Image (tube, helix red, strand yellow):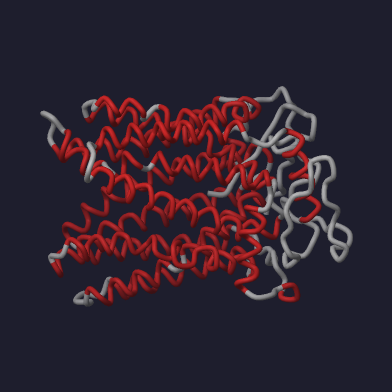
Amino acid sequence: MEATVSDERPSSEGPATFREVFAQREYRYVFTASTLAWVGDYIAKAAVTLLIYRQTESVALSAAAFAVSYLPWLVGGPLLATLAERHPYRRVMVTCDLVRMMLLLVIAIPGMPSTAILALLFAATLANPPSQAARSALMPLILTGDRLVVGLSVSVSVGQAAQVVGYLAGAAIAAVNPSAALLVNAATFAASAALLRFGVADRPPAMTPAHRSHLLRETGDGFRIVFGSPVLRAIAILVFSAMLFSIVPEGLAAAWAGRHAGEMDTAAAQAIIMAASPVGFILGGLVVGRLFSPARRLALMRPLAVLSPLVLVPALFNPPPVVVAVLAAACGFAVAGMLPMANGLFVRALPDGYRARAFGVMATGVQVIQGAAVLVTGLLAQRFSIPLVVGVWSAAGVVLMTLAALSWPSRATIDAAVVAAGRRSGEPAGTPAQPDAPSDSPRQPHPQAGPERPRPGRRDAGDHPDGGRPGDPGRQRHAVT
């Protein structure tokens, strides 16, 4: 396996390049496996939705088939993600892929009752939280410094493209044979498992059996470390707030097109509004991640956070669908531009043994907040016009994002959080989580931790959140949601 490239980049150097990111052998395997699984997942979503509708002619059951993939995050995302901390990351990801592959093969059997399909689909999606948590925790061990920021920007952007490709391919295949689409998804999971098994190093689990406690207690440590730390809490608020407003145009696209399409075809209006946000997200992740220096991305993070709801405020004036799509794309661009940096700071301020659990907390929060935002704005749109709802909702978002930006932790507080996380990385993962110490008094290592042990790909405790050392204004890193 290739040696990890040092993340010591001169402060005058620009952002990491795509070549540097893809030069990492493990990243190439994880990236390819993830892309295959994403495309297959969206193909299966389109296929199962159509399959259930054909069998039952029920819009409600068809919608339930689409929504069931979100349930594991809502009913136990952090708990399931904690499992990834107890076992080697590679084993978790490979096992989850194989489980999903087998269940999809069963779902693809012709004549399967709709209730059985929904039950099996729910069982398959239970593997999503631990698999995604393991992948999120693994990435900082593969990529270091600004390579992590750029690598995750690429992954997120490609994930958005996979959604579009998967839905289109899934609808086309399912129209001919839904079972064939499910078999394609099973094949993508098989390929993903093989790539991960033979392309990723087998690392020891973050939490040894000797330091395990109760699964619920370990899950609670994930919440405590995220919301008990001023730095992690500030990042969580910024990310959750971005999700609260950026999802609304996509979630209300069908109703917006139905009521305000004007002379435009309703289906076309819905399609361009729904596709605009992912397209903007792809462009934002690639453009900001690649063209701006690490220091500039750090400076742009808070302005982009405020800009994300601000660009939706003109929806108040009831613009035509094409203009709504442009606004949604601009919002997606702004969110994608600031998320990698926010996530990079998040992962730098986390001790090694808590990454999977923290990912479970963040991913669950994102799912719940997005669903709640669409639900609340949908209910409001029953009484008020959609442009008014989206415009006022977004204006409230500008206020919230401005407050979040103004309350952002100081550079000294961020430095201290990263130093404290580096020290805690030498402790066993079962050590109870504690809030960050004040910035002028970084917390000392736990007395049972002993001397720090070097780990593959582990960050230096002295690294600065933007990829350099404290006081070095030049660099950064990334990963979580």
Asked if residue 130 can be seen in this view, the reply is yes
Q: Is residue 235 left or right of residue 259?
A: right
Q: Is residue 165 left or right of residue 467?
A: left
Percent coordinates x, y for residue 313 in the rendering: 36, 28
- At horizontal 69% and vertical 75% (from top left) the residue drawn is 213
Looking at the image, which residue sits at the far front?
383
Where residue 453 sits: x, y (%)? 83, 58
Total labels drawn = 0
Q: Considering only vertical position in the picture, is 88 above or below 45?
A: below
Residue 21 lies in quadrant: top right
Q: Residue at x 45, y 62 (%)?
A: 73
Q: Image point 36% across, 31% down: which residue?
A: 329
- The percent position of residue 429, horizontal first and vertical second, equals 73, 64
109 or 197: nearer the viewer:
109
Above-or-below relation of 362 to 344: below
Taking 251 as reference, is 24 left or right?
right
Quarter where residue 10 is shown:
top right
Q: Residue 479 at what x, y percent from top left?
A: 59, 46
**Quadrant location of the N terminus in the rendered image:** bottom right
The answer to whether residue 190 of the structure is visible from this angle is no
Q: Pick whichever, 35 or 373, lies toward us.
A: 373
